[in-house]
Image: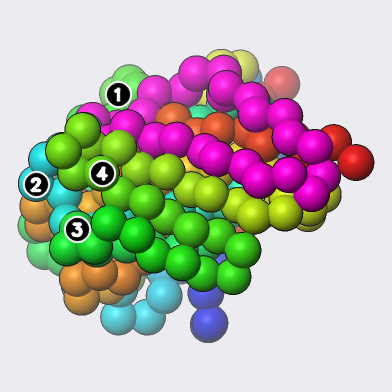
Amino acid sequence: GAGVSQSPSNKVTEKGKDVELRCDPISGHTALYWYRQSLGQGLEFLIYFQGNSAPDKSGLPSDRFSAERTGGSVSTLTIQRTQQEDSAVYLCASSSQNANTEAFFGQGTRLTVV
Amino acid sequence: GESVGLHLPTLSVQEGDNSIINCAYSNSASDYFIWYKQESGKGPQFIIDIRSNMDKRQGQRVTVLLNKTVKHLSLQIAATQPGDSAVYFCAERYGNNRLAFGKGNQVVVIP
């Protein structure tokens, strides 16, 4: 596709359930980022993938959060045993290996834990 | 480092006035900087960028200024319009093609 695609766009889940959020980056982009954004707040870094390098997981808030990127393309962010404080918009972005190019964001997945 | 979720500072500006949004970046080795605009319910979108070998770059109604001495970046919006109401993020690129984002500033345009 032409841009970064995230699915689902909205997800309502019950507390304690697991959820998977998907990100399809722009084809050929080697870098992929996941961010979390609570209402009215800034971007909270979660995880960064760059090519075949080990991902930077330093932003994941707890061991309930994990992410993988298969084949250097699609990424899945998994939240286990969801809690109400996990409710937020989860944004994915990708960028190319070329220097001096911006990252492109998806529209995000709005997660609501009830 | 990366931004942490905090309530955003807000800049209120009268329609037609100029806006200035400031950003302090963290890494002196950063060589590329970007401003993003995020409208309600959407993902951040690119506005303008600047390389570290420049100190000013102009786009349509927007100007980015870079002061590497004090690690400061600013975005100027001329003749602010209601459609400029959004959250604005700066980003720096350093090491291994990595982007790091600032905390963001909410701009509210008063008609």
Q: Decide which of tag 2 and tag 3 comes sooner along the chain.
A: 2
Label 2 in the same subunit as label 1:
no
Amino acid type, callout 3 = Ser
Pair 4/2: label in front? 4
Amino acid type, callout 2 = Ala
- The residue tagged 2 is B29
Instruction: Please tell me whether residue B10 is drawn above or below residue A53 in the rendered image.
Output: above
Q: Residue at x 45, y 35 (%)?
A: B22
Badge 2: few (under 14), some or many (20 or more) residues near its Cα, within 10 Å? few
- Whether the residues at callouts 4 and 1 have beta carbons within 8 Å, the answer is no
- The residue tagged 4 is B67
Badge 1: few (under 14), some or many (20 or more) residues near its Cα, within 10 Å? few
Side of B14 where A6 appears, left or right: left
- The residue tagged 1 is A63
Q: Residue at x 20, y 75 (%)?
A: A98
Q: What is the spatial separation of the Cα atoms under label 3 and label 4, in whole angstroms?
A: 9 Å
